[in-house]
Amino acid sequence: MKFIDEVKITVESGRGGNGCVSFRREKYVPRGGPDGGNGGKGADLYIEASKDLNTLLHFRGKKTFKAPNGEDGHGSARDGAAGQDLTLYVPQGTVVFDAQTEQVLADLTQDKQRVLLCKGGRGGLGNSYFKSSTNQAPLYAQDGAESQKFDLRLELKLIADIALVGLPNAGKSTLISVLSAAKPKIADYPFTTLEPQLGVVAFGESSFVIADIPGLIEDAASGKGLGIKFLKHIERTKVLVHLIDCSLFLEAYEAQEAYATIRAELLKFSENIRQKREIVCLTKIDAMSEKEIQLFQKALEEQIDRKVLAISSVSGKNIELLKQIMYKAIEETKDKHE
């Protein structure tokens, strides 16, 4: 399925039905009074988050969504039917913006979270409502209220516990395929992953969600490469797993420069990234001896002042340990916010 994470749409509620001008006309009631019914209320238009959706693709073919109008009132004091409310369903993590002002109208992070976007117009009153002692036969009724109409921008920010980040071809897609049932396209060249991938990782009786964020490069926060289009998906994650492909570098200081490049781009995009827990992993270690791995790992730890875990998605080395570290980091993050 194609991943669509931003669309523009127009939404409109229903117009209220008009009140009716009518008089009672019966054979033995020569002076029948006004009996015009009220117009029905126009339909409201809602937006609701659903855990069963993971893309905005269903909005790609249709751009305008109009809720039904209320029915006009009828004679014999019969009110018009109200319009049936319309609900648009979007994935969890969808942010609704006013397309004109960029004001956030809704941030839908919970399943079944529901927000009223456009309120339907009230129904107009029929002429029977306006009957009085001084006006026994009113010849007018009230029009229904107009609908509300807005241009919106919907932006999906993936909700995941963990985001895999790193330079292109750092092994993110391979790792997510090993950790979960996700099957991203994998090949030995940069930018294989052209859209974010989500995977559910089973851990004992629990599970957590990881997101494979397409490869970042220098100036990604300014839109270079795949750029800012995917950086937004990192905002909601609790923990970052930063992958460094050690097969690309002869010395640890070169790996440190690659690490620093990605960290700089993340912080340029959002200073909040600084508060996120980060797990640093060396990937593609299969061509190195155990001693070479240890020396490279120790040197890199000294340079970036963080613990580094050496893993192999091919052989499975330290993959179970990584899952344990991920799960513990997520739980610690939860505790911090409780």
Image (cartoon, rainbow, N blue to C red):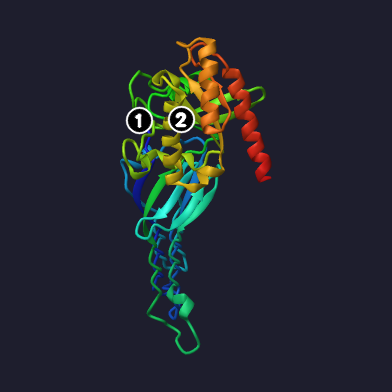
Q: Secondary structure at mark 1?
A: loop
| Image x and y of residue 87, in percent | 46, 48
Helix, strand or loop for disc 2: helix
> Relative to the observer, which residue lies in front, 224 or 177?
224
Callout 2 environment at 10 Å: few (<14), some (14 to 19), or many (20+)? some
Q: Position of residue 91 (x, y in %)?
A: 47, 40
Task: Give residue 194's mark.
Answer: 1
Residue at x-position 46% and y-position 47%: 270
Asked if residue 113 is positioned above or below residue 249 in the image, the reply reads below
Marking on residue 305:
none
Q: Can you say which quadrant of the picture contains the N terminus? A: top left
Whether the residues at callouts 1 and 2 have beta carbons within 8 Å, the answer is: no
Quarter of the image that includes the C terminus: top right
Residue 119, x across and y down, in percent: 46, 61
Camera-side residue: 308 or 71?
A: 308
- Tell me what residue is drawn at x 46 percent, y 17 percent: 284
- Circle 1 residues within 10 Å: few <14, some 14–19, many ≥20: some
Q: Nearer the viewer, residue 190 or 39?
A: 190
Q: Quadrant of residue 135?
A: bottom left
**Cα distance, mark 1 to mark 2?**
25 Å
User: Label 2 belongs to which residue?
Assistant: 256
Q: Is residue 70 above or below residue 215?
A: below
Q: Is residue 119 visible?
A: yes
Q: Name which residue type carries label 1.
A: Leu
Q: Position of residue 170 (x, y in %)?
A: 42, 24
- Residue drawn at x 37%, y 80% as measured from the top left: 139
Picture quadrant where residue 18 is located: bottom left
Q: Is residue 207 visible?
A: no
Q: Amino acid at mark 2?
A: Gln
